[in-house]
Image (cartoon, rainbow, N blue to C red):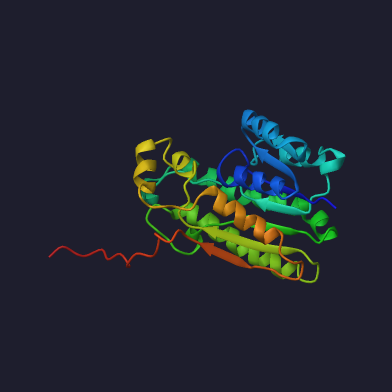
Amino acid sequence: MTKTVLITGVTAGFGAAAARRFVTGGWQVVGTGRRAERLEALGQELGDAFHGLAFDMRDEAALAAAVEGLPAGFKEIDWLVNNAGLALGTGPAQAAVLTDWKTMIDTNVTSLVTITRLLLPGLIARKGGVINLSSVAAHWPYPGGNVYGATKAFVRQFSYGLRCDLAGTGVRVTSIEPGMCESEFTLVRTGGNQEAYDKLYGGANALQPEDIAETIYYVATLPAHMNLNCIEMMPVSQSWSPFAIAREKA
């Protein structure tokens, strides 16, 4: 029987790569995104196995209507991949734009829990699973990470809480936590600053969206008795820095 996965945020990066990987693996994919033209292009590429839903994840009414209006062949969702998310700004908290913080919370946290709660009854009925895209920023803080890191820490802890509540239902939950991965993420975060993008990724041999997609697919296709609680992954080139010391002037 063909399985169906709903992936949020498929118009770029991890989400687009994951949609391609699941279709290649014989799955059906429901993909959400704000950019209708990109959804249409992805649908043309992937064919009848893909169904796009164009709406803003922060719009709860639009989200509910989109899921409710799924065609019969795509209604039974076996897996949910909560990929939609973003970071805005790289400066310190005291210089941050409050609306950027609220946008990150609304996208990375509120919309994630909304769609998860909406789909849980069906996921339980089909003994499916939830894969949440967190980040190494969930537990390795860095300057400028402030609210972004906090939202990803929520995603990680929410994943663990779901595991506790869903014990005995057969539903699996995994938090995937990538480090440096080359995608539009940094362009969004810096307001389209290509110079910052090139500086960050230059020579780093960073992870690629396809690496994350392969990991997502691996988790979803494990035997039903196996659950990976958390996967933290980085490129080999990335590691941890020494603790920062703010020294007093002599």
**Residue found at x 78% / y 56%:** 120
**Residue found at x 60% / y 66%:** 230
| Vertical position of residue 174 compared to residue 147: above or below | below
| Vertical position of residue 39 compared to residue 14: above or below | above
User: Where is residue 77 drawn, in percent x and y?
Assistant: 79, 50
Tally of numbered tags: 0
Q: Which residue lies furthest to the right in this view?
A: 72
Identify the image quadrant of residue 228. bottom right
Viewport quadrant of the C terminus? bottom left
Q: Which residue lies furthest to the top in this view?
A: 37
| Vertical position of residue 211 compared to residue 54: above or below | below
- Asked whether 9 or 55 is in front, the reply is 9
**Residue found at x 34% / y 38%:** 195
Q: Is residue 219 left or right of residue 193?
A: right
Q: Is residue 64 left or right of residue 19?
A: right
Identify the image quadrant of residue 13. top right
User: Where is residue 200 drawn, in percent x and y?
Assistant: 37, 47
User: Where is residue 102 drawn, in percent x and y?
Assistant: 53, 45
User: Where is residue 174 drawn, in percent x and y?
Assistant: 65, 63
- Asked whether 202 or 248 is in front, the reply is 202
